[in-house]
Image (cartoon, rainbow, N blue to C red):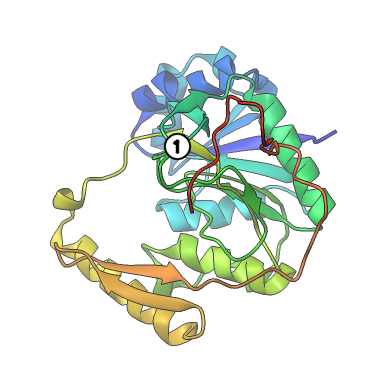
Amino acid sequence: MANYVVAIPSYKREEVIVKKSLKTLKDGGVPKSKIFIFVANAEERANYEKAVPVELYNKIIVGEKGITNQRKFIVKHFPENQYVISIDDDVEQLEKMQGPEKLVKIKNVDKFFKDAYSDLKKHNLYIWGIYPVRNPFFMKPNTSIKLKFIIGVLRGFINRHSKDLEPSVGSEGKEDYEQSILYFKKDGGVVRYNNITTKTKFNADGGLGKDRLEMNKKAAEYLKKTYPDIITVFHRKNGTAEVKLKNMSSSSSSSSPPAYTKKTTKGKSTKRKTMKK
């Protein structure tokens, strides 16, 4: 059975974390003993200790400021081989695709985390992620182990203190993409649940400032230069530079479906509909 911990990086969002991610975890059956909140400094810790009910978490830990630095700190904080779930502080719920037009809430979050660990062990891989877009029309009723983008909003990994898994400062703003590539190159694959997503609020494109646009541009240029055989670059209408991962198959294979993916049956009608490719 998976002995996991949950790491939540958070900054100046003590009210948000209570209403969203901590509620999601509690409602999903995740014990408070597994939950660790990582903040930027002692002042932040004091604020969180005042605002966050103690029955919702195990410990508040002072790490480092900045999401990239904080995620690196989390890796170093936990021992090697610890199964870590990293989740942002504003996740309202986990959702599973049910046909091309419907998403349903995952009620037993604890079980999902444990099943995901079983999938990692079965494939001899070290990181899993979810579909990065909350839209069932684009999602797929399957789990893949080839190169896919593992978004930082929610992911689970078997911890390793490996320098070759640390994203470069050059990818800041798109470090999730480099993290995905580094895991793929080291392990031969990553597990991604293409039928699982989260309800959360991302920054709207129109709200990006000049600094953010420049950071995305530099990160995209760095990734394209560093991984020319994997990365392609495109631009949104507002000028934001974006990247895509080229389709690369995993060196791992398995004849049985992952624990959290059910096969679709033919003939009789089922709750899950098959999506068109």
Q: Position of residue 101 (x, y in %)?
A: 41, 32
- Outermost front residue: 267
**Quarter of the N terminus within the rendering:** top right
> Residue at (50%, 33%) from the top-left corner?
99
Query: Alpha-carbon neighbours of circle 1 within 10 Å: few (<14), some, or many (≥20)?
Result: some
Q: Position of residue 80 (x, y in %)?
A: 78, 54
Q: Quadrant of residue 187?
A: bottom right
Q: Secondary structure at mark 1?
A: loop
- From what the image shows, is residue 96 above or below residue 233? above
| Number of numbered markers | 1
- Report the front residue among 210 and 57: 210
Q: Position of residue 211 (x, y in %)?
A: 19, 64
> Residue at (50%, 30%) from the top-left corner?
95
- Identified by mark 1, the residue type is Pro
> Residue at (18%, 54%) from the top-left corner?
208
> Residue at (35%, 31%) from the top-left corner?
13
Q: Quadrant of residue 262?
A: top right
- Would residue 35 be found to the left or right of residue 161 on screen? left
- Report the front residue among 207 and 184: 184
Q: Position of residue 35 (x, y in %)?
A: 62, 29
- Would residue 156 be found to the left or right of residue 275 on screen? right
- Report the front residue among 51 and 132: 132
- From what the image shows, is residue 116 above or below residue 224? above
Q: Which residue is mark 1?
A: 100
- From what the image shows, is residue 205 above or below residue 24? below
